[in-house]
Amino acid sequence: MEYKINISNSKTGKSYQREVKDEKAERLNGARIGESFDGSIVGLSGYTLEITGGSDKSGFPMKKGVRGSSRVRILLKQGTGYRPESRVRKKKTVRGERIDGDIIQINTRVVKEGKKSIEELLGAGKPEESGEKTGEEQKK
């Protein structure tokens, strides 16, 4: 089992993506949209993350308020899964709010921050350390 976790930090406006496999991914099974979990699952010790949504292997979005984890066709007038051009209601297929093996991507947001920054813990955003050159160094 494998999940792609998107982590959004509203304070900095940045988002990060991590992959979680095997026993760490098993801990997220059965969690629902709106629940919080420990960030150490994705390598962010001291952080608390809240599940805000996700999508399954076919690209159908998870929708809060739809019980279970199966796909259902519901009548929508707005919100997750439907962007109307007018006030027309339409039947759309969405996935339930519970995480199971068919979910591929899980969207989260930072609720509680730890002592270290996300960049330090994940090793992201530091081009000098990874050997990449910044824009100014490439021009020279």
Image (cartoon, rainbow, N blue to C red):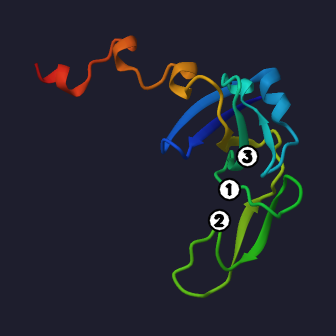
Q: Give the mark toward the camera: 3 or 1.
A: 3
Please tell me how crowded label 3 is: few (under 14), some (14-19), or many (20+) other residues with Cα within 10 Å: many
Q: Position of residue 101 (x, y in %)?
A: 81, 38
Dot 1 amino acid type: Phe
Instruction: Name the residue nearer the viewer: 9 or 130.
Output: 9
The C terminus - image quarter:
top left
**Front label number (1 vs 2):** 2
Give the percent coordinates (x, y) of residue 122. 56, 22
Inspect the image, locate mark 2, and give the three-letter code of the amino acid beneath it. Gly
Quarter of the image where one finds residue 136: top left
Q: Is residue 32 found left or right of 103 in the rendered image?
A: right
Q: Residue at x 73, y 46 (%)?
A: 51
Residue sitting at the far front: 115
Q: CA distance from mark 3 to mark 1?
A: 16 Å
Q: Earlier in the sequence, mark 3 or mark 1?
A: 3
Mark number for residue 60?
1
For the residue pair 127 and 13, the one nearer the viewer reads as: 13
Image coordinates for residue 67, horizontal then vertical, percent: 88, 60
CA–CA distance in space, label 2 to label 3? 17 Å
Of the residues under marks 1 and 2, which one precedes in the sequence?
1
Task: Provide residue 66's location: percent of width, then percent of height.
Answer: 83, 63
Q: Which mark is residue 81?
A: 2
Q: CA distance from mark 1 to mark 2?
A: 8 Å
Residue drawn at 48 percent across, 45 percent down? 13
Label 2 secondary element: loop
